[in-house]
Image (tube, grey):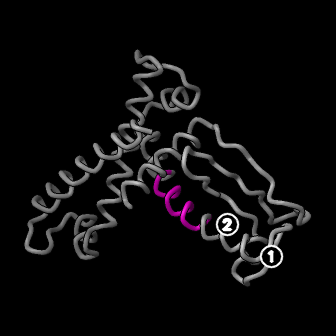
């Protein structure tokens, strides 16, 4: 399940980063302030709702229909929205961190599909994707750790019988292994 989720996150990330997501209206609830139309990012096997109007969220939580859809449809869309928000949040944070580690001109060039700083577009994109995969994997590994170990890692301490160096080394090895898996999964999509 984690592999599928990571593959979905990576696919959604590329959709978002390369700005290929299409906006779709959520119906006819009148729009207005506080209402955002649904944005749907489509992948080969999944349609992910990354935004949902406040009126539809409130309706889903109350078990009601909204925007011309019945209660069951709104509830299903809300469940999809919650799952996608969690996945997209991890990827968006990883993408932002990866972009912040690059020269500003290179980060801009990646979104434009151009080369920069002596790298052609493909090489620059590959570098960016490796950074994103690393940060997605780091978030996954950190989330899978005991809370005491995750806290110790952030404080530079040891935990569960491991010194700070042993804990950091174990974490780094797990992140590198998970990052390779993320890269393999996204390359096969």
Which quadrant would residue 158 be assigned to in this image? bottom left
Q: First in sequence: mark 1 or mark 2?
A: 1
Q: What percent of the width, then of the height, locates residue 78? A: 66, 69
SS at mark 2?
helix
Identify the residue position indicated by label 2 in the image: 77
Q: What percent of the width, then of the height, locates residue 185? A: 37, 43
Q: What percent of the width, then of the height, locates residue 80? A: 60, 65
For label 1, the crowd category at 10 Å Cα-Cα, with few meaning under 14, some 14 to 19 and many 20 or more, is some
- Residue at the (79%, 72%) spot, across then down: 55
For label 2, the crowd category at 10 Å Cα-Cα, with few meaning under 14, some 14 to 19 and many 20 or more, is some
- Residue at the (88%, 63%) spot, across then down: 32
Q: Quadrant of the C terminus?
A: top left
Which quadrant would residue 163 be assigned to in this image? bottom left
Query: In the displayed structure, does residue 182 sit left or right of residue 162?
Result: right
Pick whichever, 168 or 139, lies toward us.
139
Query: In the displayed structure, does residue 16 sit left or right of residue 129?
Result: right
- Predominant secondary structure in magenta? helix
Q: Is residue 134 magenta?
A: no
- Residue at the (22%, 71%) spot, across then down: 149
Identify the residue position indicated by label 1 in the image: 65
């Amino acid at each position: 399940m984690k592999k599928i989720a990571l593959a979905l996150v990576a696919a959604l990330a590329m959709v978002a980063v390369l700005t290929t997501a299409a906006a779709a209206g959520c119906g006819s609830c009148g729009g207005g302030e506080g209402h955002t139309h649904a944005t749907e990012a489509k992948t080969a096997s999944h349609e992910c709702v990354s935004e949902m109007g406040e009126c539809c969220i409130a309706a889903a939580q109350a078990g009601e229909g909204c925007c011309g859809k019945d209660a069951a449809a709104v509830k299903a869309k809300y469940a999809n929205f919650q799952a996608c928000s969690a996945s997209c949040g991890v990827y968006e944070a990883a993408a932002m961190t990866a972009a912040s580690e690059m020269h500003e001109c290179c980060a801009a060039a990646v979104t434009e599909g151009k080369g920069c700083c002596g790298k052609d577009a493909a090489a620059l994109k590959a570098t960016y994707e490796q950074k994103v995969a690393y940060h997605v994997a780091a978030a996954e590994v950190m989330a899978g750790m005991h809370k005491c170990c995750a806290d110790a890692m952030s404080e530079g301490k040891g935990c569960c019988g491991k010194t700070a160096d042993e804990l950091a080394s174990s974490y780094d090895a797990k992140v590198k292994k998970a990052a390779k898996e993320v890269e393999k999964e996204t390359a096969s999509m």
